[in-house]
Image (spheres, rainbow, N blue to C red):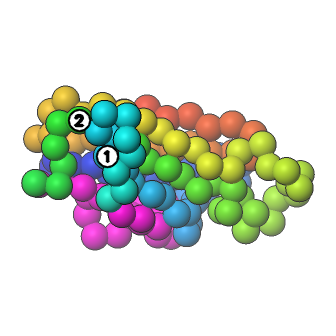
Amino acid sequence: MSGLTTHVLDTALGVPAKGLMIDVFRIVEEVREYIKTVRTNADGRIDGGPILDGDNFTRGTYELVFHAGAYLKRTGLVLPDLLFLDIIPIRFGVSDPKAHYHVPLLLSPFGYSTYRGS
């Protein structure tokens, strides 16, 4: 499999983050070029296969912008009125577009982590 995928897990609740909106950008000479917006399903993944693949996935820099605040507000957790985490941008490089780039987000109201998954 090649292309770009993601998976969002809510580590505070121990469940997939359902309904989290993610904006996808390509970065060209430090300018963000909007590609599309996707939303996670009940499993915290994106329906319909890779977010980007084939001719739409080329060598370069990309950014996934996770709208964590809107998701966190819907969880029922007691949160401060001014969220610590709201928008989480993750910028990464793609050196081999024929490879699979999985960029997961492990999320809680006060922290997150990511890595290149499989």
| Residue type (three-letter) at the residue carrying disc 1 | Arg
- As measured in the structure, the alpha-carbon distance from the residue carrying label 2 to the one carrying label 1 is 8 Å
Measuring 11% from the left and 54% from the top, which residue is drawn there?
54
Side of 33 relative to 79 (left or right): left
Most foreground residue, 27 or 72: 27
User: Regarding mark 1 in the picture, which secondary structure is present there?
Assistant: strand
* Magenta region includes residue 53: yes
Residue 25: x and y in percent read 37, 50
Q: Quadrant of residue 81?
A: bottom right
* Residue at the disc numbered 1: 26
- Res. 117 in view: no
Side of 66 relative to 25 (left or right): right
Query: Dividing the image into 4 quarters, which one contains the C terminus?
Result: top left
Q: Quadrant of residue 31?
A: top left
First-in-chain label (2 vs 1): 1
* Residue at the disc numbered 2: 60
Most foreground residue, 34 or 117: 34
Overall secondary structure of the magenta stretch?
Answer: loop
Measuring 73% from the left and 68% from the top, which residue is drawn there?
74
Is residue 49 positioned above or below 88 on the image?
Answer: below
| Residue type (three-letter) at the residue carrying disc 2 | Gly
Residue 30: x and y in percent read 37, 34
Residue 71: x and y in percent read 65, 62
Structural crowding at the residue carrying mark 2, measured as other residues with C-alpha within 10 Å and reported as few (<14), some (14–19) or many (≥20):
some
Is residue 48 positioned above or below 59 on the image?
Answer: below
Measuring 21% from the left and 42% from the top, which residue is drawn there?
100
Which stretch appears magenta? 36-54
The answer to whether marks 2 and 1 mark residues whose Cβ atoms lie closer than 8 Å is: yes
Residue 67: x and y in percent read 59, 56
